[in-house]
Image: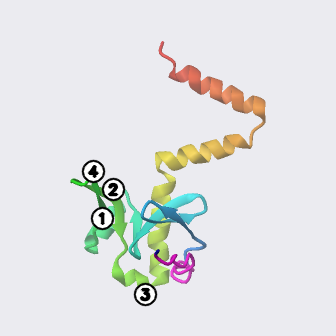
Amino acid sequence: MAAKADPHRFDDLFQEFGPIVLRRFFGGEGIYAGSVMIGTIFNDVIYFKTDDKTIKAFRKEGTAPFTFKKRGTEIVETTWYALPDRLYDDPEELAHWARDALKVASASPEAVRKARKAAEAKLPRRERQRRQHRRAAARAPR
């Protein structure tokens, strides 16, 4: 059985960015800033979430996307790109890249849905029901 990785091994690296939490994520770990997953770690390589705008910086640095085999044959390329090697020695610059990843991840449909659900959970029961009813009515065929 493999030894469990230290969940605080990247704390110094992310010190300029702010607190992060590592959680198990498939065969690796997810990097969370609050409730938002901004990156992943596989084989101690950090990958950040990208979009059409931020991916350009990763490509310019020559980093590769995280890939995996689907059903043993098809290779799937994700929007998670490896952190450039130079950033492992530059926490200040890494913080800028991490903030960009946080913006991208926060804007994802899944993050927006989770944030709305968390906000609605704080509403009074009657208001939650009213909003749910309105959304259901909007989705109903006319």
Q: What colour-coding does the image apply? A: rainbow
Q: Residue furthest front?
A: 1
C-alpha distance separating marks 3 and 1:
21 Å
- In the rendered image, which quarter is residue 127 located in? top right
- In the rendered image, which quarter is residue 47 located in? bottom left
C-alpha distance separating marks 2 and 4:
27 Å
Circle 3 sits in a helix, a strand or a loop, which is it?
A: helix
Which residue is found at the position 53% from the left and 77% from the top? 14
Q: Which mark is residue 89?
A: 3
C-alpha distance separating marks 4 and 3:
37 Å
Labels 1 and 4 touching (C-beta < 8 A): no
The residue identified by callout 1 is 65
Which residue is found at the position 38% from the left and 60% from the top? 50
Q: Earlier in the sequence, mark 2 or mark 3?
A: 2
The residue identified by callout 4 is 71
The residue identified by callout 2 is 52
